[in-house]
Amino acid sequence: MDENQITKVKAERRAALSSACTAVGGEAKLAELIGKTRSHVTTWKYRGMIPADQVIPIEQASGVSRHVMRPDVFGPAPDQSEEAA
């Protein structure tokens, strides 16, 4: 993966995490709902990396799809994979 692709992936993850935060009322609320500190959420956002083991709790709390947050782990969303076929 080249530098441009890495930058794009990080931006997509930041956007997904921002959407999750917005859906629940902010970083502090998301952190509370998933049993982490706000610092964890802020760090993930800054780095553009959501730990794979936190994706399901974030999805359950916010409704943001695991396929959007970490397609490298969970694959594309089911409707996206059908379109590609």
Image: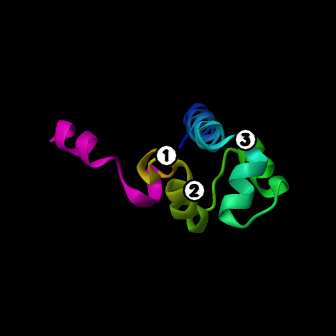
Q: Is residue 59 magenta?
A: no
Residue kind at label 2, given as amino acid type: Ile
**Label 2's element?**
helix
Residue kind at label 1, given as amino acid type: Val
Distance between the Cα atoms at labels 2 and 3? 12 Å
Quadrant, the C terminus:
top left
Q: Position of residue 74 (x, y in %)?
A: 40, 58
The residue identified by callout 1 is 64
The residue identified by callout 2 is 58
Do the residues under discs 2 and 3 have CB atoms within 8 angstroms? no
Q: Along the polypeptide, which appears first: circle 1 or circle 2?
A: 2
State the extent of the magenta-drawn residues as a range: 71-85
The residue identified by callout 3 is 26
Judged left or right of residue 40, residue 76 is left
Distance between the Cα atoms at labels 1 and 3? 14 Å
Q: Residue reaching furthest right?
A: 39
Residue shown at the point (46%, 53%) measured from the top left: 66
Q: Position of residue 51 (x, y in %)?
A: 63, 61
**Label 1's element?**
loop
Q: Along the polypeptide, which appears first: circle 2 or circle 3?
A: 3
Residues 52 and 56: in front is 56
Number of numbered labels in the structure image? 3
User: Which of the 4 image quadrants contains residue 11?
Assistant: top right
Residues 64 and 10: in front is 64
Residue kind at label 3, given as amino acid type: Gly
In this rendering, which labeled residue sits more in front, label 2 or label 3? 3
**Label 3's element?**
loop
